Image (cartoon, coloured by chain):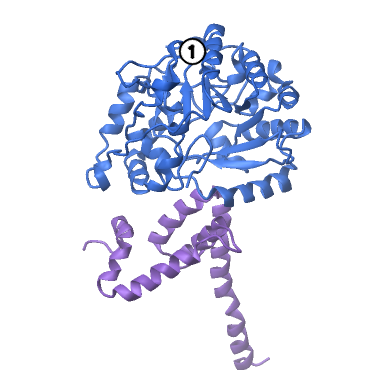
Chain colours: A purple, B blue
Amino acid sequence: MDTYYRPEHLPKFSSIAQGNQKLADKFFDYYAEVFKAGALSAREKALIALAVSHAVQCPYCIDAYSKESLQQGADLEQMTEAVHVAAAIRGGASLMHGVQMLEHVQRQVMA
Amino acid sequence: MGAPESKELVGPRATTSLVSRASPLVSTAQQLKTLRQVDLSKLPNQGVFREKLTPAGIDIFQINVGKLCNMTCRHCHVDAGPDRTAEMMSRETVDLCLAALDKTTAKVVDITGGAPELNPHFRYLVEQCVARGKHVMDRCNLTILLTGPCRDLPEWFASRGVEVVCSLPHYRQRNTDLQRGAGTFEKSIEALRRLNAAGYGRGDPRLRLTLMHNPAGAYLSGDQKSMEREWKEGLQANHGVTFDALIALNNMPISRFLEWLEISGNLQAYMELLVNAYNPATVPGLMCRNTLSVGWDGRVYDCDFNQMLELDTRYADGRTAHIRDFDPQQLATRAIVTARHCFGCTAGAGSSCGGAIA
């Protein structure tokens, strides 16, 4: 293996069942159920998945949910806004921890 | 080279016709060969469309009155455009269509093009069909309704109860203009407002306004119901426009969309997508089973896509069908002509002139 990520792995996702069919069945059933249109539309779920894909930086997921978002009727502007939501939360999560840093500083430095 | 463009035709242009560029894909044999040459040997049935399709009776009589259009959308399966002035249904052929229609039990007449409104006999054809008590559908590109001689059409259609089926790939600007040319979205919204003002799209079953979506790229249409809900919310909230229903179609890998698939390097993946998404539940509802499609020159086809590939309907004895010797009894026993492009209609939720099937 000369690289960790290969596009041809994506359609082989279901082969993960080779080691444990029961767990794979449960997972894929659950997965399919999660993405059905419900209180959220299929497009909204695809955009959430796209944002999360960027937050977890999974190229397989970005590939799959870029296509799915388009198919479910999202356009580039909506998809870009979804990615910015992921970026804002990731950036915000770092920055929010700054308050911990601030408290450490306030405790340890003479006012 | 094709004929010079008609100067009066104002409309957005995303590309130019294959004919005007003398593309090799002008040849329908070349299109079929291009599709056959895609290596799908590792896919189910090696990517061969094996379904034997039989007619279920003619419910919809579809008439393609010509290839002339004020627009040149990237995905057009007709290779329509302002330069396509040569292919125009004559009054004589229109009358042959009406005589043939009288021999069928079809309740719906589906008029398409090009921009069908540009045929000089369009209004005559509509009047004659309405007089026969048929439900008439006009496949409208919307922008044509803003051009000179067509500006009165919303009211003209309304007084005759014609259903207007409009192309609008997206309820937001970007994907609409990418597919159909800069400025299309704005013009389409204006045309929809005029249709609304004429009473269309407000829930009156006599004045149905149907929008037609197809993807702006190499992916399938999504969930039709879900999209209809979002299109309705989006158009109402942002533009104050209403409509009755949305139908979603897949793009057929022929003509200008085939050219785009080739140029963009998407052909192999798109054909794999279509074949892998084959859904047998779509077969009973395929439009080729309940529709007959007549070309501008009177040749008869199983559907508008076969028409564009010049895959003529054949009687059981092998003769190609023409509207002048239209024989519904003999046509009822025909075998529907299929090839690889048919995977476009059987993929996912399916796709027909009436939208999703399964």
Does B338 sit left or right of B202 as displayed? left
Q: Residue at x 24, y 43 (%)?
A: B46
Secondary element at tag 1: loop
Q: Residue at x 53, y 29 (%)?
A: B60
Chain that bears disc 1: B
Residue B50 spot, x, y in % from top left:
29, 39
Does B354 sit left or right of B149 as displayed? left
Q: Which residue is mark 1?
A: B87
Q: Nearer the viewer, residue B330 or B226?
A: B330
Q: Residue at x 49, y 45 (%)?
A: B221
Residue B332 spot, x, y in % from top left:
41, 26
Count the numbered circles shown.
1
Neighbourhood count class around disc 1 (C-alpha, 10 Å): few under 14, some 14–19, many 20 upward: some
Identify whether B242 is placed above or below B293.
Answer: below
Identify whether B183 is placed above or below B42.
Answer: above
Whether residue B270 is visible here, answered yes or no, is yes
> In the current view of this chain or complex, which residue is farthest to the top?
B92
Q: Nearer the viewer, residue B341 or B323?
A: B323
Q: Nearer the viewer, residue B74 or B227?
A: B227
For residue B316, what is the image quadrant? top left
- Quarter in which the N terminus of chain B is drawn: top left
For residue B133, what is the image quadrant? top right
> In the current view of this chain or complex, which residue is farthest to the front?
B329
Identify whether B221 is placed above or below A60.
Answer: above
Q: Residue at x 45, y 21 (%)?
A: B328
Identify whether B175 is placed above or below A74.
Answer: above
Q: What amino acid is labelled 1 in the image? A: Glu
Whether residue B18 is visible here, answered yes or no, is no
